[in-house]
Image (tube, helix red, strand yellow):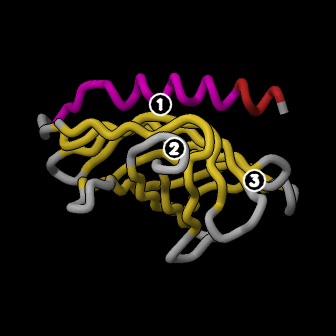
Amino acid sequence: MLYFQRRLGVVLVCALAMAMGPVAHGAQRLAKVSGGGTATFDFIEGLQSQFAIGATVYSDGSAKGLFMCMIVGVVTISGEVEKGSSNSDDSVTFSGVAHGIDHVLGGPFEGCPFEITLWSGGPGVGRFLYNDCVVPPPGDYETVSKGGITIRRR
């Protein structure tokens, strides 16, 4: 488990560096999302995940960054952010392609489309909604229990 926690920290640092990088096509930054910690599933009692996000959405709908989520003993997901939007309810939505390891089925996976919508805040306030090729819409709502999510506009 310590290995995965260290890897999560390394991924967060890399994601933040990627999210802050220059954009070749000159689109304006709409929002930058960063954060991480522990989140509790809203509708699955006792289930928690470790997560990290570092991504930026631009005015042309493109996005750059990384989302990582790990449910210990179940799945580890690393999602490369490709598209995004800044929403009217103060949330930000990202989509892209994920890869990772399914610890239950015992193998790696690649090319799994995902989407995540995030709301800023610390414990009990910050939250996200995640869905992918295995977790269909509407997805899983999770609320931050440790750590936080920060959304910076422009």
Q: Residues within 10 Å of mark 2 (few under 14, many from 20)?
A: many
Callouts 2 and 1 close, C-beta under 8 Å: yes
Residue in the picture at 78% in, 59% down: 46
28 lies above or below 82: above
Image coordinates for residue 128, horizontal then vertical, percent: 49, 56
The residue indicated by pointer 2 is: 67
Is the stretch drawn in magenta largely helix, strand or loop?
helix
Of the residues under marks 2 and 1, which one precedes in the sequence? 1
Q: Residue furthest bottom?
A: 137
Image coordinates for residue 90, horizontal then vertical, percent: 27, 54
The residue indicated by pointer 3 is: 75
Residue in the picture at 38% in, 37% down: 150
Say which element carries label 1.
helix
Q: Residue furthest front?
A: 124
Left or right of residue 18, residue 109 in this image: right
Which quadrant, please, contains the C terminus?
A: top left
The residue indicated by pointer 1 is: 15
- What whole-number distance in Å separates the C-alpha atoms at marks 2 and 1? 8 Å
Q: Please, what is the three-letter code of the amino acid marked with disc 1?
A: Ala
